[in-house]
Image: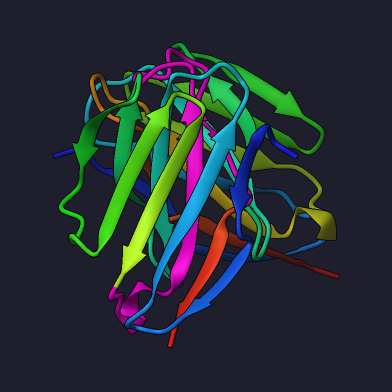
Amino acid sequence: ELKVEQNPLFLSMQEGKNYTIYCNYSTTSDRLYWYRQDPGKSLESLFVLLSNGAVKQEGRLMASLDTKARLSTLHITAAVHDLSATYFCAVEFSGYALNFGKGTSLLVTP
Amino acid sequence: ETGVTQTPRHLVMGMTNKKSLKCEQHLGHNAMYWYKQSAKKPLELMFVYNFKEQTENNSVPSRFSPECPNSSHLFLHLHTLQPEDSALYLCASSHDYRGNGYGYTFGSGTRLTVV
């Protein structure tokens, strides 16, 4: 069965703190995507990870992929309020459309 | 604008109505998708079209009827919906069905309310 699991599903963190969101998946894949969704809005592409060991960084967010562990992480550094949103990981399993995790709702508080 | 345009942005319809959602992309993509996003649920894939041919139908009730007249346009025809069908309906497109490392581009969605 194709599964994508994110944790935590809800995350409240203070501004300035660091935290990591985890994305595990059930079957071999070397293509993983991270999206951001603001309330009532569509999904915005953040990162595309296409190989084992891939690491991408944009501002305070850094994503990595370990295909052997079937794990991706989204690390938040020195969080700011503007990062409050829901973050989804999505895995491309061979022959199937993108399979999404349930999303992590992030709230950054002062 | 993401390159994928959905209309209308909001739709309120009665259970006996018939309406259609429209999705348009001019990104040169060949695959298009309908997703349903309900409150507190993960994104649910509904339909996949690749080069205008339907390749996936994830056990979607027949009150939802997709149409893909060409690679740039995708419709979702709605009839006799139920209140539990109220959700955000997202359209997406990609270079081809397997994405090939480009991921999907999503539209802004249609917020559907069934009364």
Q: Is residue B89 magenta?
A: yes
* x 28%, y 75%: residue: B80
Q: Nearer the viewer, residue A34 or A63?
A: A34
- The structure's colour scheme is rainbow
Instruction: Give the quarter of the figure containing the N terminus of chain A.
Output: top left
| Residue B22 appearing in the image | yes
Question: Does A75 sit above or below residue A63?
Answer: below
* x 25%, y 21%: residue: A28
Q: Nearer the viewer, residue A56 or A17?
A: A56
Locate residue B62, reporting x and y percent: 18, 60
* x 82%, y 33%: residue: A59
Question: Does B71 sit above or below residue B46?
Answer: above
Left or right of B22? Residue B68 is: left
Count how many numbered circles sit on residues in the image: 0
Q: Is residue A33 magenta?
A: no
Locate residue A62, reporting x and y percent: 67, 31
* x 42%, y 75%: residue: B86
Locate residue B112, reporting x and y percent: 50, 70
| Residue A8 appearing in the image | no
Locate residue A103, reporting x and y percent: 48, 54
Instruction: Give the quarter of the figure containing the C terminus of chain A.
Output: bottom right
Question: Does B17 sit above or below residue A84?
Answer: below
The segment highlighted magenta reads B80-108
Residue that sits furthest to the bottom in the current view: B115
Q: Quadrant of residue B43?
A: bottom left
Q: Nearer the viewer, residue B63 or A13?
A: B63
Q: Quadrant of residue B79?
A: bottom left
